[in-house]
Image: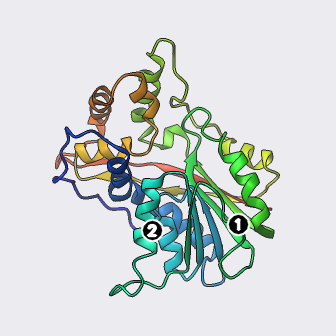
Amino acid sequence: MTPTLVRNLRDADPSAPADAGTRARDWAEIQERMLAPLYEAVYDRLEVGAATRMLSLGCGSGLALLIAAARGAQVTGVDSDRDRLALARARLLPEEGAEGAPAHRARLHESGLPSGAGADGAPYDLITVFEPIGCAAGDSEGLVPALEAALPLAARGATVVLTGWGPPERCATAPVLRVAARLTESARPPRPGGWRPTLRDDLEDVAARTGLKPDGSGRVSCPFGYADQESAVRGLLSTGLFDAAVRATDRSQVEKEVAEALHPYRRPDGTVWMPNVFRYLVCTT
């Protein structure tokens, strides 16, 4: 899937408070599609299709699930964000009988894992974690217990895919994300959760802690392209990577400084373009 510039949400009031529902829509309508090349690359490598029973941890608003389901896979998604999950339900589980409604074999769960394996009773043969780690301090801590809880639902020798940010020198977004670290560290006392440079073995460390066996890896170009600066700020803040900075200062301050950090990536036509590389690690149980 070719990355495209996302549309500008001109009907949104930029002065309105960013409640959870608004941020979930910003994620689904602006930011989530930036990772579509990563989803496609993983699915191509693993030949995801009708024989695949996939469990997605942190499925968000469901784009990765939708792409897999379009290939014929049976998909199950889990996410703790109620608003993102509601958008995933609208995408994957439209009202029965609705005109043009796709017949996706999908199950969605808030927070907790499903009580059993896939809808057909068979264990999962693919578990994906498409929420990239390696950018915020401690962002892998919740992943380890989530994987440990999910692995009993997988078949022996199942595939597990972990994803993370690429090297900072290959990610144009890294300097923008440093705004989060600077603002978070400016709080007195300093607050946890700020940006940190990606480490070479972030994914391998998670695999080792959960008893997974690495079986290959890859890098994928995922440019972040936005119709204008406002869309870029809204999309980036929807990721959650600036939450600690917002708590340390306030949203308007974060928006202002992120906008300033985006200046080097603005093109003459007003669009914003930031080349990035993401990494994935293929493991087996």
- Whether tag 2 and tag 1 are in contact, CB under 8 A, the answer is no
Number of numbered discs visible in the structure rendering: 2
Q: Report helix, strand or loop for mark 2.
A: helix
Residue 245 in the image: above or below residue 42: above
Q: Is residue 20 left or right of residue 120?
A: left
Q: Nearer the viewer, mark 2 or mark 1?
A: 1
Tag shown at residue 196 = none
Which x, y percent locates residue 187? 45, 16
Which x, y percent locates residue 178? 44, 29
Q: Distance from label 2 to label 1 (Cα)?
A: 19 Å
Residue 206 in the image: above or below residue 182: below
| Other-residue count near label 2 (Cα within 10 Å), few / some / many at <14 / 14–19 / ≥20 | some
Which x, y percent locates residue 250? 33, 26
What type is the residue that disc 1 sits on? Ser
What type is the residue that disc 2 sits on? Arg
Which x, y percent locates residue 81? 49, 51
Of residue 60 and residue 279, the one placed in the foreground of this image is 60
Residue depicted at x 33% and y 51%: 26
Picture quarter containing residue 252? Answer: top left
Of residue 130 and residue 111, the one placed in the foreground of this image is 111
Q: Is residue 277 left or right of residue 257?
A: right
Residue depicted at x 41% and y 57%: 32
Q: How is the image coloured?
A: rainbow
Picture quarter containing residue 151? Answer: bottom right
Q: Report helix, strand or loop for mark 1.
A: loop
| Other-residue count near label 1 (Cα within 10 Å), few / some / many at <14 / 14–19 / ≥20 | few
Tag shown at residue 89 = 2
Q: Is residue 153 left or right of residue 83?
A: right
Residue depicted at x 46% and y 23%: 184
Picture quarter containing residue 14? Answer: top left
Q: Which residue is mark 1?
A: 115
